[in-house]
Amino acid sequence: MELNEVLRFADEKVFSKTGKHLDDLQEAILKEVIQGRKYATKIAQDRDCSEGYVRVAASELWKILSDVFGEEVSKVNVRAILERSKFYTNFSPTIGSENVTVNNNLNVCQERARSPTKPQNPQQTPKQLHIDLGDAPEIFTFFDRTSELSTLENWITQEHTRLIALLGISGIGKTTLSLSLIDRIKTQFDYVIYRSLRFSPTLDATLTNLVQIFSQQSETPQSIETKISQILDYLRKNRCLIVLDDVQMLLGSGQIAGQYKTGYEDYQLFFKLIAEVSHQSCLILNSWEKPREIARLSKDNHPVRCFVLGSLGVAAKEILNSQKLSDQETWETLIDIYQGNPLWLEFTATLIQELFGGRVSEFLQCEMPILDEGLQSQLSKPFGRLTPAELAVMTHLANQPEPVAVSQIFNKIPFSPSEIVNAVRSIANRFLLDTQEQEQITLFSLNPVLKQYVKTQYS
């Protein structure tokens, strides 16, 4: 059978089963394997990627083909299985005798064609819920996020979204929301796992930890490719909810937002596989910087969603009430100035209580906004990641009385239009920009807190 015919047949079978065609990388792997060549090195060189990346993609391809053809498929037997299946597809009406002979170098098992048996439905024993929250912080107070919780719950339980990026500026409440979500829907899962990536563990370390949770064994496979395959297999067989917090710690500093640090690029492949491979679980990524692959995956009809968490709004009054602040008629003004950000308001409320006796009206008589030392320290983290071009754009915006269009920044700072456009896009992916539409023009600005921080630190 010709190579192209085998590839076309494989693609047709995969599409009929999954609704998706083989992608370029999968076709390249099949092509090399069918021709009996060592595929990993050649494809990695041709595509400028790691051999590990190719091997993981191949492992997933064998799993897809195994599901499609109903038997174990590997690089050793894939050609024989494809050609045998092609033969049965073409000549199935006449197959039924004891012996079948094919004169095209194709080995076919000499057995009767068997009619499919009806699947058995033994009574299933309910699985025990396994919850591992690891180093999750204890939540003492949860402010009203009813709408946000309902949306996330619907995505996970009704729409079966596989990958959710929960995004937003530092302090906005992503961790609290995700832990509250866990508490709300945990009984619908077999496994619920929370892990923080604040110390930048390698993918290998993260996978090892997950495999140990699922397998309840201390020994794990050595190969990262095998670990990924095992994790995906667990996600197929079990209903799992996994939250990975502080994903921004995997991303690099001093470069365009969303790019992984050296040595952490394999996470990008892992997240991509979570989105693309069929399973019944959900992975939530919490980050105050959008990973670069998330934007593309969420636009390619994959079961991937982004949720950008915003202001608490009037629910933030609970924070001020817990700090026993006075002058309730001024609280909404204070909330607006500090963008309804729970952490920013907590810092500020403590400052008001300590220096102004809890009187919000007296505090608001000062030139706004005042940035508590803790708040400034918190803001230094995302600002420490900015590229020179991003910092120049932020400084320019901080000194503008009104929102401006990107084109209005050209020639105002010593960077090319391309550098400025990419910088604005990157800042937006760090959630440090306010955007508004006016007469079909997109305008950008900084909120009062960020504007004050830039003026204080960089002007």
Image (tube, rainbow, N blue to C red):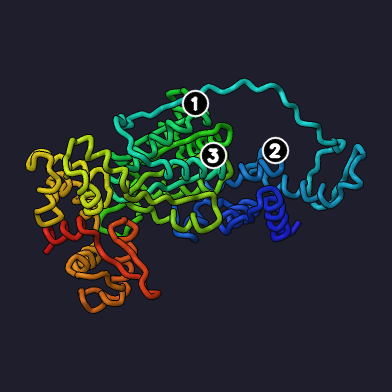
Q: Nearer the viewer, residue 213 or 131?
A: 131
Circle 1 SS class: helix
Residue at the spot 67% in from the left edge and 46% down from the top edge:
78
How far apart in space, not on screen, are marks 3 and 1 (Cα)? 25 Å
First along the sequence among labels 2 and 1:
2
Residue beneath disc 1:
215
Residue beneath disc 3:
157
Q: Is residue 360 above or below residue 129?
A: below
Q: Nearer the viewer, mark 2 or mark 3?
A: 3
Residue 107, how many percent across, how many down?
Answer: 79, 44
Q: Is residue 3 above or below residue 204?
A: below
Q: Is any part of residue 214 visible from this angle? A: yes
First along the sequence among labels 2 and 3:
2
Residue at the spot 38% in from the left edge and 53% down from the top edge:
291
Q: Residues within 10 Å of mark 1 (few under 14, many from 20)?
A: few
Residue 260, how many percent across, how many down?
Answer: 35, 52
Q: Is residue 132 above or below residue 305?
A: above
Residue at the spot 54% in from the left edge and 33% down from the top edge:
239
Circle 3 SS class: helix
Residue beneath disc 2:
71
Q: Nearer the viewer, residue 264 or 421?
A: 421
Task: Point out the image quarter for the C terminus.
Answer: bottom left
Question: Mark 1 is on which residue type?
Answer: Ser
Residue at the spot 80% in from the left edge and 42% down from the top edge:
108
* Marks 2 and 3 close (CB-CB < 8 Å): no
